[in-house]
Amino acid sequence: MLHTEPPVDGPDLLVRAINISAAYSVPMKQRAKGMWLVQLFEYAIGFALAMSAANSVSPAALAVVAVAIIVNASLSDGFLSAFQVLRPRTHRVIGIGIAVSALVIAVVVPLELTSRLTLVIAALTQGFVSVRFGHGFRTTSTRPK
């Protein structure tokens, strides 16, 4: 015959729950998830900029920025990367640097108006994606890293 424990309720249930949670506590860590979505956005920005470069009179500046964005996305640590070299923090810093460099190129290099506007829009979009979603989408997880 099995010996069953008497039912626990009230304050004893709370004490038992606290003891169990203390014995099996796993620290909650912020984990970066959704890096593939960030990469998808960056690939879209880079390839749109490359298509604009193909139709531009002076495509060099647009093509350089497009290649930099695509290479940054392909080297980051995510599902859509070709080589998982860059950690999310490094990827974010490089993305912000690319956005600032694209703005400087748009101001300094003599370009036609459409190329200049395309470069500014791409720089602002890349900057927003890098600043807002540069580490991926944060979720709370109890899984150890």
Image (spheres, rainbow, N blue to C red):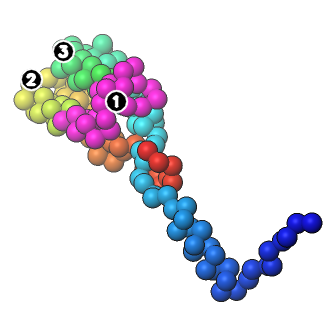
Q: Which mark is residue 110?
A: 2
Q: Is 21 part of what is drawn in magenta?
A: no
Q: Residue at x 21, y 19 (%)?
A: 64
Q: Of discs 3 and 1, which sits in the foreground?
A: 1
Q: Residues within 10 Å of mark 1 (few under 14, many from 20)?
A: many
Q: Quadrant of the N terminus?
A: bottom right
Residue 101 visible (yes or no) = yes
Residue 37 sits in which quadrant?
Answer: top left
* In the rendered image, the vertical position of residue 38 relative to residue 72, given as above or below: below
Q: Which residues are magenta?
A: 72-97
At x 46% / y 40%, what residue is drawn?
34
Residue 32 in which image quadrant: top left
Q: Amino acid at mark 3?
A: Ala
In this orientation, which residue lies closer to the viewer: 18 or 145? 18
Q: Which residue is mark 3?
A: 60
Kindly identify which residue carries mark 1: 76
Asked whether disc 1 touches disc 2, contact meaning CB atoms under 8 Å apart, the reply is no
Q: Say what secondary structure mark 3 lies in.
A: helix
Q: Residue at x 70, y 86 (%)?
A: 10
Pick the front one: 138 or 128: 138
Cα gap from disc 3 to disc 1, whole angstroms? 25 Å
Identify whether 67 is placed above or below 11.
Answer: above
Q: Are marks 3 and 1 in contact (CB under 8 Å)?
A: no
For badge 2, the amino acid type reads Pro
Tell me if residue 47 can be seen.
no
